[in-house]
């Protein structure tokens, strides 16, 4: 999807921070390597969206309405991504089945991606 210039790809600054965190902390990548690869994605057309007050309020509302520690542990950052997709009238692309459930209940189109094991979400 990122390779297709006709397909708009947007990540919020908060979700970009999550990518940096996972790549460095969990996968052990060096900071320079991670930042260089992100620079290439941005140069290739990946848009980084700002998070404003309206997005913050809407994300908080969605999390408050849907969060359940055991059955629906949706993160606040995921809610920010969802609100951004809704505002842009774009499909949300994720492998997170919890987020997919919340997105669908909020009327957002979803494109499911395979998880780290190659399994597609429900």
Image (cartoon, helix red, strand yellow):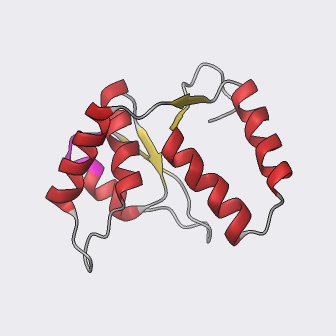
> Which residue is more in the foreground, 8 or 67?
67
Image quadrant containing the C terminus: bottom left
> Which residue is more in the foreground, 26 or 5?
26
Is residue 56 in the magenta section? no
x 47%, y 51%: residue: 94
The answer to whether 100 appears left or right of 46 in the picture is: left
**84 in relation to 8, above or below:** below
x 36%, y 31%: residue: 52
| Residue 68 visible from this viewpoint | yes
Image quadrant containing the N terminus: top right
Residue 6, image x, y percentages: 60, 19
**70 in relation to 24, above or below:** below
> Which residue is more in the foreground, 86 or 75?
75
The answer to whether 26 appears left or right of 13 in the picture is: right
Residue 32, image x, y percentages: 85, 49
Residue 95, image x, y percentages: 49, 58
| Residue 105 visible from this viewpoint | no
Location of residue 116 (image quadrant)? bottom right
Residue 16, image x, y percentages: 58, 45
Q: Specify start and end residues of the magenta stretch as a single range.
A: 103-108
Is residue 107 in the magenta section? yes
Outermost bottom residue: 70
x 23%, y 41%: residue: 57
């Amino acid at each position: 999807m990122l390779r297709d210039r006709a397909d708009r790809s947007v990540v919020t600054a908060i979700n970009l921070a999550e990518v940096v965190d996972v790549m460095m902390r969990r996968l052990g990548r060096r900071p320079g390597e991670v930042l260089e690869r992100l620079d290439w994605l941005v140069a290739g057309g990946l848009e980084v969206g700002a998070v404003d007050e309206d997005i913050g309020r809407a994300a908080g509302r969605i999390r408050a309405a849907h969060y359940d520690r055991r059955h629906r542990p949706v993160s606040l950052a995921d809610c920010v991504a969802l609100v951004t997709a809704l505002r842009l009238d774009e499909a949300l692309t994720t492998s997170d089945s919890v987020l997919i459930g919340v997105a669908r209940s909020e009327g957002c189109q979803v494109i499911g991606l395979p998880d780290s094991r190659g399994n597609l979400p429900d």
